Structure formats: C-alpha cells, structure tokens
C-alpha cells in the first residue's frame, strides 16, 4: 500500500474511534449517575482489571502492552468525566472554596507578626520584608521553632527556605511540612549574595575556619575545594554565624553571609560573591495554620503518596497534562518505614479560582493513597 492510502485508512479508523470514544464517555456518565444514586465509589479496580485482561487477550501478544497503556488513560478520563457528574464536593474542594471566600478581594496583610529562623540580618528576614512591608519579627533558633511558633498561635505566619537553585531542596523543611499540617500562603524568590567576611581589624593571618549555615557552605563548595586547608563548620544560620565571628577573639575565623550582615555586625568583606553560581536564588515560603488563597495566587503545591504499583506516578502526571496544567517541580522523598515507597511533592502553575482546577484537585485526592494540599499562593 502507498503511504497516502495507509494514512487514509488511519484517518477513517481515527474518526470511527472518536465516535466510539464519545459513546463510551456517554456510558461513563450514565455509570456515574447510577453510582451516585447507590453510593458506590467512582473507581472500581476489579472492573478495570477485568476489562484490561479481556482486551489485551483480544489484542494479541504484540499489541497487548499498547492496549494496556491506552486503557490506563481511558480509565483516567472516564473517572474524570464521572467526577464531573457528581454534585458533591470532596474535602479539598470544600477547603479551597472556603479559603477563597474568606480572602476574596484581600492581599497578604502589610502588618503581621512573623516567625523567622536565625537573627537580624538573616536571609529569612530579607525574604520576610519582601512579603510583608511592615512585619514584626520573632526569631527562633531552628526551623522547628518557627513551625512551633505558628502552631501555638504565637505568630500568624512563618518564613522558611524551601529550595535553593544551587544546593537543591531544604529537606529538613520538607520533613517538618510532613510533621505539621500547615499551608503555604505566599513565597518569595530571593537572590543570595554570599560574601566572605572577617572580624573588623583582624590580622592578615590565613583563614583556618569558615562558619555559616550548612546550605550556604554547600552553595560555596568550589571555594572550599580551592582552599582545602580551610575547615567549613555549619551553624544554625548565616546571621547567627556572622554574629559569632564578630564576637570571637579569633583572627583566623571567617563567615559566609550576606552583605547586610557585614554592615550589621561590623565585619570586613574579604571576598566578593563566593557562591558556586553567579545566579544563586533561594525560594522562601510563608506558612500559616489556615489556608489563605488570595486573588493573585497562581501556584499550587501538593504532597502525595501514590500506590506502589506500575504507572501510578504517570497517571497523576498524565492527568495534569490532560488538564493543561504546567508542572513546575516534581520531587520525591522516601517514606520512613516503607521500603522503596516515596512521597511526592508537586509544584504547578494553576489557579485555584478556576473551577476546573479545583475539580482536578478533587480527582487527585480520590486517586492518591495520601493527599495533602499545601497551598495556592503568589510567588514574588
């Protein structure tokens, strides 16, 4: 057969497939209505398995894997279609709808009591002042202290680093996000300007030790590779480390911190930006006990546990693609005590004010073993 004739045959088959697919979706809607009246769940694993086994046997050995993949997508679409027939709201749909109603026409407040880790001059403080023009800041020694302050109602908001463009995610914050059920209500992408600083008036003796936050040290790994004689010592925060150096009697001690710390603690900058990458940014998130979804929010973060079976992650990613949602980040973390099972973190460009997006969240919630809506927020 000539290529043009083969393509005519394919076109004819496609047209027939579309007609049959439309009939199948009509039947799916009828099934959804019947299930709604009887209270049965939308997904029926046994029925899906029976269909796949029957149709792959009909397709033959060579085509069986393709039929299995095809019907995996068809089942996803059918469940989505059936969900639209039901008139009830899933828990996440109800939560999002309520949060939007409570913040309609509002913005993050200009005045707020905010928890930050570290001390004055910390990068978290700088991010805080980008998000809140007039914040009152309480400082805590650890990330856990920030979470506890928000959990106990001591502060309405907390500022935490979540990801760096050079060193990757701040895994400790992700672990705490699993421990505490909070929501992201805002975010800021802050340019990190690491400087090497010494105590004012220190001698010209060689530097023996540099202190800073472990993430900052990791972001300046090339500096330490070039100076193997220098010890890198992690501390709780860059600003805490700068204050420590300023009060120290040692002349061979230095710190990696921001230019603001040099001015604040009277330190001398002895090395310009020592980051591995000239373009070094850290994403800071603003957390709250209650979900707050403001009109400017265009980013959604989720935390999901998926069934430990082939195709479970692909099902979620495909569903996002079908809905036209742009996936910005996908990261996995091992589940403690569950061998080779993972929790997935999703960031996506989506607006919870869109009814289709909210319905999509409800579908994902029904599909996943564990579903956590982390927030819909604006990232500056």
Image (spheres, grey):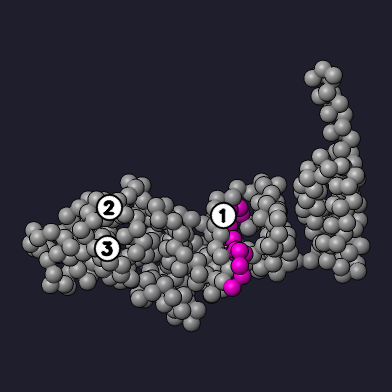
Of 18 and 9, the residue lying toward us: 9
Say the numbered circle drawn on residue 100: none
In percent of width and height, residue 251 lies at 12, 66
Q: Residue at x 42, y 52 (%)?
A: 165
Q: Nearer the viewer, mark 1 or mark 3?
A: 3
Instruction: Write down the region rendered in magenta.
Output: 337-351
Residue tagged by mark 2? 225
Say the numbered circle drawn on residue 232: 3
Quadrant of residue 179 within the rendered picture: bottom right
Residue 380 among magenta residues: no
Query: The residue tagged with tag 2: helix, strand or loop?
Result: helix
Query: The residue tagged with tag 1: helix, strand or loop?
Result: strand
Which quadrant of the rendered structure holds the N terminus? top right
Query: The residue tagged with tag 3: helix, strand or loop?
Result: strand
Using the numbered discs, state the Cα–Cα distance from disc 2 to disc 1 in whole angstroms. Answer: 30 Å
Using the numbered discs, state the Cα–Cα distance from disc 2 to disc 3 in whole angstroms. Answer: 11 Å
Residue tagged by mark 1? 330
Say whether disc 2 or disc 1 marks the residue closer to the N-terminus: 2
Say whether disc 1 or disc 3 marks the residue closer to the N-terminus: 3
Label 1 CA crowd tier, 10 Å (few <14, some 14–19, many 20+):
some
Residue 341 among magenta residues: yes
Q: Residue at x 87, y 38 (%)?
A: 17
Q: Residue at x 39, y 52 (%)?
A: 166
């Amino acid at each position: 057969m000539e290529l043009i004739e083969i393509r005519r045959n394919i076109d004819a088959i496609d047209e027939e497939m579309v007609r049959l697919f439309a009939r199948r979706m009509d039947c799916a809607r009828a099934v959804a209505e019947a299930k709604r009246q009887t209270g049965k769940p939308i997904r029926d694993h046994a029925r899906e398995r029976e269909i796949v086994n029957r149709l792959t046997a009909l397709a033959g050995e060579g085509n069986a894997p393709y039929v299995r993949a095809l019907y995996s997508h068809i089942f996803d679409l059918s469940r989505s279609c059936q969900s639209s027939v039901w008139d009830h709201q899933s828990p996440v749909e109800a939560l999002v709808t309520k949060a939007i109603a409570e913040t309609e026409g509002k913005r993050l407040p200009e005045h707020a009591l905010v928890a930050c880790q570290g001390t004055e001059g910390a990068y978290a403080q700088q991010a805080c002042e980008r998000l809140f023009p007039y914040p009152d800041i309480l400082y805590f020694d650890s990330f856990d202290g920030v979470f506890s302050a928000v959990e106990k109602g001591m502060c309405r908001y907390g500022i935490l680093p979540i990801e760096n463009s050079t060193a990757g995610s701040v895994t400790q914050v992700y672990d705490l996000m699993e421990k505490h059920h909070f929501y992201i209500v805002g975010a800021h992408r802050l340019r990190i300007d690491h400087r090497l600083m010494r105590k004012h008036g220190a001698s010209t003796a060689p530097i023996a030790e540099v202190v800073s936050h472990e993430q900052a040290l990791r972001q300046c790994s090339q500096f330490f590779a070039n100076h193997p004689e220098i010890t890198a010592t992690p501390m709780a925060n860059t600003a805490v480390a700068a204050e420590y150096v300023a009060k120290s009697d040692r002349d061979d001690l230095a710190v990696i911190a921001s230019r603001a710390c040099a001015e604040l603690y009277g330190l001398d900058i002895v090395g310009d930006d020592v980051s591995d990458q000239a373009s070094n940014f850290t994403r800071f998130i603003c957390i709250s006990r209650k979900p707050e979804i403001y009109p400017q929010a265009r980013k959604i973060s989720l935390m999901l546990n998926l069934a430990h079976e082939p195709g479970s992650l692909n099902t979620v990613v495909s569903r996002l693609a079908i809905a036209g949602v742009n996936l910005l980040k996908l990261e996995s973390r091992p589940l403690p005590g569950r061998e080779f099972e993972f929790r997935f973190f999703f960031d996506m460009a989506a607006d919870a004010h869109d009814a289709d997006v909210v319905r999509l969240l409800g579908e994902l919630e029904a599909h996943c073993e564990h579903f956590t809506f982390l927030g819909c927020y604006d990232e500056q």
